[in-house]
Image (spheres, grey):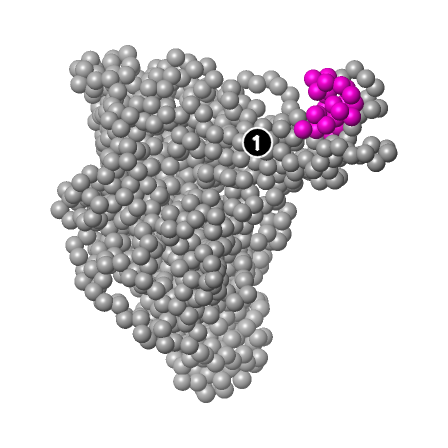
Amino acid sequence: MSDRQYRHVGQSPKRIEAQEKVTGRATYTFDMELPGMLHAKCLHSPYAHAEIVAIDTSAAKALPGVKAVLTGEDIPYLLGLYMIDKRVLARGKVRYQGEAVVAVAAVDEETAEKALSLIKVEYKELPAVLTIDEALEGKILVHEDINELEYIKGVFFPQPDSNIASWNKTIKGDIKQGFAEADLIVENELSLPPVGHAPMETHVAIAQADPYSKQIKIWSSTQSPFGVRQLLAKALGVSKGDIQVIAPYVGGGFGGKAGIHLEPLATVLSRVCKGRPVKVTATREEEFNQLPSRAAMRGRVKTGVKKDGTITAVEIYYDWDSGAYADYGVNVGRAATYSGAGPYEIPNIELHSRTLYTNKVFSTAYRGFGHLETHWIIERQMDMVARALGMDPYEFRMKNILRDGSVTISGEHINAYSGRPDKCLEAVAKEIGWTGYRSPEERQAAFKTGKVRGKGLASLQKAPAMPTNTSTAAIMQMDEDGNVRLMVGGVDMGQGSNTVMAQIAAEVLDMPLEKIKVVWENDTDRHPYDWSTVASKYTFMGGNAVKRCAQNLLKQMKELAAQILRCPVEELAYGEESIYHVQHSKKKRIAYKDLAMGYSYENGNSIGGPLVAHGVYIAEGLTYLNPDTGQGLPALDWTFGAHGVELEVDIETGEVEIIKIASAFDVGQAINRKLVEGQIIGGVLQGIGSALIEGFKFSPDGRLLNPSFTDNKIPTAKDIPAKIVPIIVEYPQLDGPFGARGIGEHPMISVPSVIANALYDALGIDFYELPMSPEKIALAIKKNGIQ
Amino acid sequence: MPFVYHAPRTLENLFATLDSLEQYSLLAGGTDLIVKWKEKLIDPKAVVDINGIAAMKGIEECPHCFSIGALVTHYEITASARLRAAATALYEAAGEVGSPQIRHIATIGGNIVNASPAADTAPALLALNAEAEIQSRTGISAILVADLFTGTGRTCLKPGQIISRIKVPASGQNQGSAFVKFGKRKALAIAVVNGAAWITIDGDKIKDVRLAMGAVAPTPIRLLAIEDWLRGQTLAASTFKTAGTMAEKLVRPISDIRSSAEYRGDLARQVVIRALETAARRAKGGCACG
């Protein structure tokens, strides 16, 4: 572990914007009002799949206060991240219940809503694709034009005349031979439903499209201002230079605000309204029912093992019920191919990941990007295989876990600096006092008390899923008084990245943290570029850019100071916000602030000029994956982790009480310890939501039945386990800033698996579907005759 | 749609206002009304804000009972040490309604007349044998809260009638009550099943008992047959278990998005067992709130 002492790195300063947020002064897009602003509302499809026969908007248009009514026919643009498959408003047909069909802009929301009630849409209902099997059968196509859709070739693989938006695979070794070598083969099928992101601030966008030029200005609750700029420019066929995207404070993203969502609609409405700003605010119901969710998934896994526990072969089919449009869904499916078998060495593997179009609300990135889903399958399977072997699941994992010298399923060589999944597993097992599964007799004895306890373990891994050329940048300017204004491309949506960046800058410059002023309200016209704030990559990438930026600032200051002190740069040192000669009297030190705008001698002569520094980082060493085998180097950095849990089940009601959950992650080096712990606690709780509470329910005809907080619950403060023990493991990554790796998404991965594994320990019952609601648990207990 | 807003400050003015209106909605805490309104489930032509009426406020103690104004908030109930001691089930139920924000504004009267089968205070009031004072321009009468509900979202209140106060008998020596709720999560959840028990003990026997349950029928219900059986039974775990089994057989819950009927039946059993156990413990312990 790292034994280096830092002034700021590894400390726990509070978030730099905390006061502004808790006092309610922070302004979010949701709060914004502009002069002359109009409000937009959408009419949604009541059907999962239907032809739009006719739309009558005449009465709505005639309503006083209505400024624009648009249908899909009015908007020719096609949108998409990887598959260009989505319209701003449905055109010709609707592909999910909740899809926006007509949009109205009016002087206020009430008028817009009234206008919606005056619109008549005639539909002809079509048979819908509502299950994974129906999607695979392909008798009905969600996109009958799938063969013509534009997509990123070589990365995604839509299948002709099918509902398969992309079929990605990993093929390594020879599974036939691997299974032949196995002493035991275990097969299982598990699944999980879609869930909503439920950010505190729903999606909201304001657009102002200048009627006299091509210029478009957007304020959005987005995680990806540069992504919005890029995708909007492409869809509208305008230059990126004409588009300005501003992200004020963002009230949570969780992946749901990556990509592009309400911005194009706000833009086209503003254009029609002669440049008046138009605000589109998703209601909570639209957040669940119109905007994308996390996909449902079914995983079928077959594992071959030797008697000593060595894995010889794995075959996996992940089928993603990804809804009506591809959005991020196809890339979630792709990430599963190189990360979806867990942190284990597997010599022979075939992993198929099929992202399927269905007539349901579409899916997108969600904290962990497919990993909670794949690890739900894999980490349950690891326990079930261990049991079939009669082996302790801890030993079984340790036997196969990635170590220095292991090769991942995409062919990447793990080394001593790649992180230590074994140390994470070891730490959580120790923390919960893991001694193996209880015996059936012990279980039987516990049933008599009405409350039974169980323990479980699960491992996890994740690397950022991103293009090989993903990049980011930072800019610093020094004020006259020596404050440093730092501009970064990443969006701080509550994860605390700006605080982390300030710590890194202050560390390099050896300055007080308060003197690093991070400029909020990311603005694509002013802030330096960042691809998108997603994938748990920003501490790593942004951190490296900021570190280099600060080093660049320091270099400029030293070069100037070398002239003033009349010595070579190499003989200069820095500290206490000043530059000085290593040997000479420190009285001659030059304060940073005296260099900020250029240095002035006593006689008035001046040299230098305002200090402006920059730093960049581009993902290094990544390669495209082989389209046939998925082999290549997709991972900038792996963050490994593990959970251990002890829980108690009320056998009468099925209620689960988590006594203690210990969660360990090898973050390389914590930059802000408190923020790392915050990510762990928040992620674990969000994982508990997926495990026990959350999940979309659909009617037989494909209507979402719980599109509100009335019946789509997420955990509250009262659902926080009695004890969450964050364990920070630190084996530094050589190319991470101060050794750091990402941690934003990881804590929720494998939480459902670890809870299910502990439920098995408690009850001797295996659960294969999420959520494991009290009802499901109670009925399973009854079915198994436990009393 | 446009509506007319009235805010009478006295009961007299209130009744005059109500009599002048063809159709109206009463606004107390608004936590149900505004939601229904936003979801376009209602379209009131007139809204009568009753929050200014002092006669409908405050918790008063009368001999062997409490008089709780219909405008008393759930928070006020949870803040009352006397209700906690002598109407424990109601105290507990009020603390389970919504979130702290909702409990600070939502009223007990509103929770009752909203007539949700899953309302948390309803089973507690039924088990405690609470009465509602129904008032109109022509006078005042009292009926058991149990008799108020005529269906989901429906009460027997006629136009011009309001509930002004609720009378809750105070539990005394050898008496205790308890409320139990099962929801989808630990806070801010609509009950999958809820229920309450009130018990009077005589040594190791059950002298008198009332049981009520929510979310298992179109209205909150009393479990009279089980009460009859329980009277005179010995205080014992087996008695409570039998009562629980009877409840499971007695109730006819539905399957909906929140739960299957089967699981509701299982929970009904647990509600009865746990509410009786806790109520009996409180009756025995002397302190009603233990």
Tell me the magenta residue range. Answer: A556-581
Looking at the image, is B3 positioned above or below residue A442?
A: below
| Chain on which label 1 sits | A
Q: Secondary structure at mark 1?
A: strand
The amino acid type found where label 1 is placed reads: Gly
Q: Whole-percent x and y of residue A691?
A: 36, 39
Q: Whole-percent x and y of residue A733?
A: 50, 21
Residue denoted by label 1: A615
Residues A639 and A298: in front is A639
Q: Residue at x 34, y 49 (%)?
A: A79
Q: Residue at x 51, y 39 (%)?
A: A529
Please identify the quadrant where the C terminus of chain A is shown.
top left
Q: Is there any visible trace of residue A75 in the rendered image?
A: yes
Left or right of A647? Residue A324 is left
Residues A467 and A375: in front is A467
Looking at the image, is A162 positioned above or below residue B69?
A: above
Q: Residue at x 45, y 25 (%)?
A: A620
Q: Number of callouts in the render? A: 1
Q: Whole-percent x and y of residue B212?
A: 37, 59
**Residue placed furthest toward the left:** A139
Q: Is there any visible trace of residue B220 in the rendered image?
A: no
Please identify the quadrant where the N terminus of chain A is shown.
top right
